[in-house]
Amino acid sequence: MKRINKNNIIVGSLGILLILTIIISFQLGRYPIPTKDLLGVLLSKIYPLEQFWSDRMETVFFNIRLPRIILACLVGCCLSAAGAAYQGVFQNPMAAPDILGASAGAAFGAALAIYLYGSSYMITISAFCFSLLTVALVFFISKRVRGKSILGLILAGIMISSLFSASTSFIKLVADPNDQLPAITYWLMGSLAGAKLSDIQFVFMPMFLGLIPLLLLRWRLNVLTMGDDEARTMGVNANQIRLIVIICATLITAASVSVSGMIGWVGLVIPHLARKLVGNNYNHLMPSSMLFGAVFLLLVDNVSRNLLTTEIPLGILTAFIGAPFFIYLITRKGESY
Amino acid sequence: MSIEVSNLSFSYGERSVLDNINFTAYDNQLLSVLGPNGVGKSTLFRCILGLLHGYKGQIRLNGIDIKSLSIKEIAKLIAYIPQSHYPSFNFSVFDMVLMGTTVQLSYFSSPGLQQRMLVESALDRLGIIHLKHRGYTQISGGERQLVLMARALVQKAKILILDEPTANLDFGNQILVLTQMKSLAREGYTVIQSTHNPEQTFLFSDTVMAMKGGRVLACGTPGKIFTKDLIQNLYGVEVEMQSLYEDRARVCIPKSVIERDYKQQLCS
């Protein structure tokens, strides 16, 4: 029983860490918002307060900093949850959110929208739709692969991903090198610099619809890692659970990449870190992956917008931080997991 | 709890794997399925567990055809104990056993205190309570097999199916696992295992079913069906069979090996 309590404490601590990180993140930036003003602005929404902060502060808070912080948390949370979920259904610790082509599809959708001079809203919608379409296509093809269904899914995912990557490259080739090409390239590097409140409105429903079932089904995900036959003999309908988990994980991945662009490594590294912390039981692994992912991406985004005078794309930073950290994790001495 | 298999046939495409299998297993009984590799033992088990469909014939649990039961209903009646394996992720022994309680839970819920108590008592029952915080992949093969048995016990199914439970185990662990299986049978479980060891089969089983080429060669109490001819027929090895302890045990010795060495000795 002692061990269980320890994990509950870790999950709780991660929650507190997230709140602290959010508060600190508000203060960072070209217009720092002190905690006093932060509380004032927030409280004034529920309770009438005399304004002791500047209007400019309020604009920065609601239109720039708040959407960006919320999005960083949501995207980090979703990518990590999706990574953890895919790792479970594929019984493979190396699985990441892009395993079924969700990212490659989103990249193509975004590049296409930029090429057709779509508005930023159109780019998001196009990325989201192509992401879902790609995974649906992968699923459809895998049904026709003979043999093991998991292997079929992974193979189809690799093939369709490379097909869409090639298509994205082709769009880059024919795109206008003066404005379209840089826009596509920048989108592909991943960034939350353009975060708006409308982005949050767009991604909120799909993220909510994806995250809640993943949390509710987390115990069954444990049983699924034992393999289909064993899961079935324990009364778990493996195919059904896998389908639901894949749909949910895809939904949140698509929603994330459609507003943030390509952000690699979070979906692979954070679940592994969470595994080190709380073990492989999804009862604790899923919530701690979500919280940890939110903290991680928020921190990285803070670096992204504060380190240099120009923004550093998130995708570059997560790889710079993620890859060495992952190497440290897997080469570190100690109990293997 | 009885399990009754009648006229069961199964084929993968053109290739027939099971051909008209008939047998009944009762509670308080350890039934061993003996036969060479690739004889269809695993296929038979997969049919009984409801993992394979498209077979001919009937499998009835207490008179109910399993085709009319859902995955969950079958899991409440039959538990499967695979060969001790390495899963992709290392779970603690406690969590591993806790997974067996899933069948008692509603779709979206996780195990609670009641299920945890069940796990404690199952681990205690099999004498592995000291392992509960260890990682499943860090314990020995014999211990892993016992953990999988505990997982089946918390499932509360009365029929246990074990696929070669003693394969890959050292001699001591083989005896330990078989002793536990036997005592579970004595507690009222219906225990069905597949095995490759004739001598241990004789020693521990209540009923032996010998299979060859997808058919049942012989089925009955070990004392009745265990003969030199049966072993030779099953494995193509001529053996000498000796009875020990007033026929409570029988040993098989491959004749050709002994005779060759014996002749060599005579010549030299």
Image: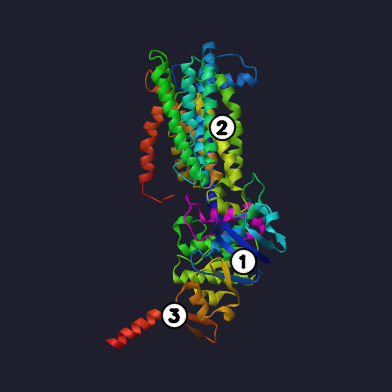
Report the side of A219 relative to A275 (left or right). right
Dot 3 alpha-carbon crowd within 10 angstroms: few under 14, some 14 to 19, many 20 or more? some
Q: Secondary structure at mark 3?
A: strand
User: Given the image, on which type of amino acid does mark 1 rest?
Assistant: Ile
Magenta residues (range):
B74-102
Q: Secondary structure at mark 2?
A: helix
User: Given the image, on which type of amino acid does mark 3 rest?
Assistant: Ile
Query: Which callout, 2 or 3, points to the residue nearer the camera?
Result: 3
Q: CA distance from mark 3 to mark 1?
A: 30 Å
Task: Tell me: residue A61, above or below residue A74.
Answer: above
Across and down, in percent, residue A323 comes to 37, 36
Q: Chain of mark 1?
A: B
Confirm whether the magenta stretch covers residue B13.
no
Residue where numbered disc 1 is placed? B21
Specify which label sits upstream in the sequence, 3 or 1: 1
User: Given the image, on which type of amino acid does mark 2 rest?
Assistant: Leu
Q: CA distance from mark 1 to mark 2?
A: 48 Å
Q: In this view of the protein, can residue B150 be seen by the observer?
A: no
Query: Which callout, 3 or 1, points to the residue nearer the camera?
Result: 1
Q: Which mark is residue A251?
A: 2
Q: Residue at x 59, y 64 (%)?
A: B19
Residue lying at the far top in this picture: please name it: A55
Residue where numbered disc 3 is placed? B253
Task: Tell me: residue A59, above or below residue B122.
Answer: above
Q: Nearer the viewer, residue A26 or A238?
A: A238
